[in-house]
Amino acid sequence: MTELVFKSALDLGRMLRARKISSQDLLQACLDQYAKHNDSINAVVVTQLDKAKAAAAAADKRLKKGRALSAFDGVPMTMKESFDWVGSPSTWGDPALRDNMPAVDAVALQRLTAAGAVPYGKTNVPLHLADWQSFNAIYGTTNNPWDVTRTPGGSSGGAAAALATGMSAMEIGSDIGASIRNPAHYCGVYGHKPTYGVVPYRGHLMPGSVSISDITVAGPMARSARDLTAMMKLMAGSEGIEARGLQFKLPVAPQKSLKDFRVAVRLSSPIAEVDQTLQDLLTKLGAFLQKRVKRLSWEAAPTFSDAEAYENYIILLRTTATKRMSAKEVEKYAAQARTLAADDTSYVALMTRAFGLSHSAWLKANERRHQMALLWDRFFDDWDVMLCPTAASAAWPHDQKGERHERFIPVNGKMVSTIDQRFWAGYSGNFYLPSTVAPIGLTAQGLPCGVQIITRAYGDYTSLRFAELLEREYGGFVPPPGH
């Protein structure tokens, strides 16, 4: 059974339809992994087992009659704690939200359960989803299954850890600052950050909010790139008011093999230096691709500076937090911002300006963001994908002291701010671009490394196709030792 739970969700679905295993037995196999490993990992923090067992029994009845709802009918899944699931609280790791019991499932979850997927639990997050670690005062700390002294990433950290340990076959995550991508990278699984707005976000909002924040997206996580593609086909598309007149039709990837791809590769940035251990793995991948793709460049990049891209992202990212601030708080930050030197572009200075930003200033920042987005789109006239780091390092030791920007991680023998690597989050995210993270190997310390595959807006299936080909021809998910 241990080998079984590490198969891809699509392979599990095929076994179910062939009646090689029942959905109830498959659910139990995942629950056995949960019972065996969750005490040490703390990935799954909420369960509704009676509900899951009833769903698995219903799937078995359909499958016995040959009436599978989809390729995922009967496959066990979990979801990020912040997604609404009737019968469980959506706390976002905040004790004040312990009693936030939704009346309706999140739309992304509805689309997977309508396809027969069997949810049994929720996975851990940081407070308000605001960290690259996953810990909170309600559910405690989630550990990385490759090294329990290290972070699994955040904010979809419990999700990645559950997938890596075989507790779950499919996951729903969300991403505004690499919250799907970093955990996938740190735990050695797959994650896809869709084009902004393509996957419905309703049912993933804090109480009292109905509007969706800038930049943030919902998306799939799994142990196979093929699973991500199949999940996107179920999850993507308008809903609610928009669905009355707006439907997405994401273009099919035209590439059939690696030789059809034009590939740009970036190893590091002066804004966010990448540890050499990760650069070496990216270089090894690039060398593998050099003779297998249509064209490959180590220099090609969109024609804007990394510094401007980073500063624009931090400003626009941090302004999303002002939605929950009072007018008095905003004015306090605006007053502080007026005291800053004009050339102070430190993270704290950028954050302070963002918290006190006027609407006029936001409009100017947004205009520049869209100008740079057009430069990205022109870049993708010549290149199909950009391969680059997901983060500055592999998973780093737990550090829960102080604020995020006060914490440091080792990169090439130096201690650098954890916040610097936000450059790699915003490189695609701030411009609404899709990007897929795929595992490409282990560092000398035995920690996973994932490559970030960026492509043009609404080209989700292109980055996913590239990830599928890497999985087939280069390598993919491997279980962490001991699980």
Image: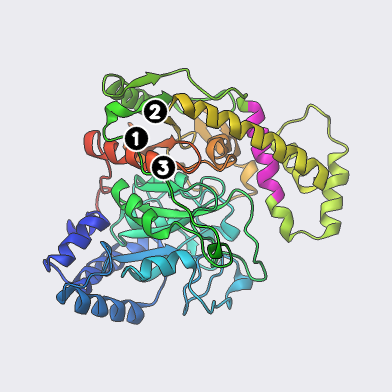
Quadrant position of residue 446: top left
Q: Can you name the residue that lies furthest to the front here?
A: 245
Residue 313 part of the magenta segment: yes
Residue 368 image position (x, y, % from top left): 70, 34
The residues bearing labels 1 and 3 have C-alpha atoms spaced at a distance of: 24 Å
State whether the magenta stretch is mostly helix, strand or loop: helix
The residues bearing labels 3 and 2 have C-alpha atoms spaced at a distance of: 21 Å
Disc 2 is placed on an element classified as: helix
The residues bearing labels 1 and 2 have C-alpha atoms spaced at a distance of: 9 Å
Residue 262 image position (x, y, % from top left): 38, 25
Q: Are marks 1 and 2 in contact (CB under 8 Å)?
A: yes
- How many residues crowd mark 2 within 10 Å: few (<14), some (14–19), many (20+)? some
Disc 3 is placed on an element classified as: strand
Q: Nearer the viewer, mark 1 or mark 2?
A: 2
Q: Earlier in the sequence, mark 1 or mark 2?
A: 2
Q: Nearer the viewer, mark 1 or mark 3?
A: 3
Q: Which residues are magenta?
A: 307-319
**Picture residue at 39% right of the left edge, 39% below the top:** 463
Note whether 2 is above or below 250 in the view shown.
Answer: below
